[in-house]
Structure formats: structure tokens, C-alpha cells
Amino acid sequence: MEQAAGDEGRKTQDVLSVSAAYDGDPSCIGAARHLATGFLAEVQAVHGLPVSERAMGMTQLVVSELVTNAVKYAPGPLMLDLQIIQGAVRVSVWDSDPVLPDIAATDPQRIGRHGLEITLAVSQAYEVRREPVGKRVTVLIALADDPGADIAGRTTP
């Protein structure tokens, strides 16, 4: 489901953020990616914060992976929240299934189920927690590139 009027909220005083509720239909995956891209474009164009091409691409990838997992494993509604925090975009997806995701053991022969591995590889931080109903998966992605950092924006020693 595309967002209906009233399903999206923005606050631009102290915190730059956007939220959207979806019904869990597979079409919401593309809508969520589009929301993330538009949000980061606005953050850059209107608010003057740097958003690298890497950050834009990694945010689209992570949003796609997290929303896809919610659609696949937690039938029903889901919520996407994007927020700018200390030079990073915080991507948070809530769904109604209380089962926490697990990382499959590395297996180059395995087809599929690599989304969480990819998400962890490209993010600065990852957190999953149960909520009173369901769970929330949260990821941080650096907005600006650091020449001495890895793909996730973490500085290597």
C-alpha cells in the first residue's frame, strides 16, 4: 500500500525525521525505498546536510532488506521511521512478529537469506528489540564518506 494521507509525518525543528505506516503488501517495499530516497534528498537539498552517494545507496538497500523481511516474515502492518542523528540516518522498522531475526551461518552455497548479513556489513550500528507488540529493527548509516573508513563508515584501526 502506498502511504495514505496522514500516514507520513515530518518534523524539521530539532530533529529531521519521516515515518510511514504500511499494510504489509509487497508493493510497500518500493514505496519505502522511495520514501527513504526522497527524505535523504530533502535532507541534503533543503537542510544542507551532506549525503554521499554511498549513504543514499546503502540506505535504499537497508530499507529494502528490512521492509522485505517484515513483509515476508511478519504478515500485517509495519512502520518505517527515518531520522537524522549525529551525521547518520537512523532506519527503524517495526513489525508485529515478536520473533527476532537471526543471522544464518556463512555458507557461500546458500541461496537467499543474506539480507541481515548485508545489513550488518553496511551499517555502523544494529539493534533489534522486542516491543510490547512485535519487534523493532534499527540500523545507523553514516551520511558522509570518510576516506579512512570501510563501507559502513566505520574507521578502521
Image (spheres, grey):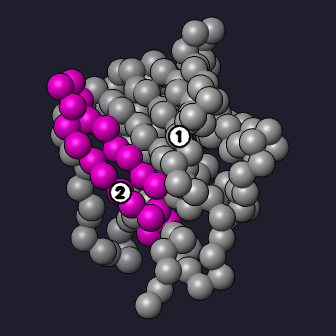
Residue at the disc numbered 2? 126
Residue drawn at point x = 75 percent, y = 42 percent: 47
Q: Position of residue 78 (x, y in %)?
A: 40, 26
Determine whether, in the image, residue 35 is placed left or right of residue 154: right
Q: Is residue 108 visible?
A: yes
Mark 2 / mark 1, whichever is N-terminal: 1
Determine whether, in the image, residue 69 is placed left or right of residue 49: left
Q: What range is drawn magenta here?
A: 121-140
Secondary structure under the numbered disc 2 in the rendered image:
strand
The residue most toward the top is 5
Residue at the disc numbered 1? 83
Q: Tell me the quarter of the image containing the N terminus.
A: top right
Determine whether, in the image, residue 98 is placed left or right of residue 136: left
Residue drawn at point x = 59 percent, y = 85 percent: 148
Determine whether, in the image, residue 60 is placed left or right of residue 117: right
Please name the predominant secondary structure of the magenta segment in the image.
strand
Q: How many marks?
A: 2
Q: Position of residue 21 (x, y in %)?
A: 48, 21
Q: Which sits in the foreground, 19 or 135?
A: 19
Secondary structure under the numbered disc 1 in the rendered image:
strand
Q: Position of residue 132 (x, y in %)?
A: 18, 25
Q: Which sits in the foreground, 13 or 118?
A: 13
122 is within the stretch colored magenta: yes
From the viewer's perspective, is residue 17 above or below residue 126?
A: above
129 is within the stretch colored magenta: yes
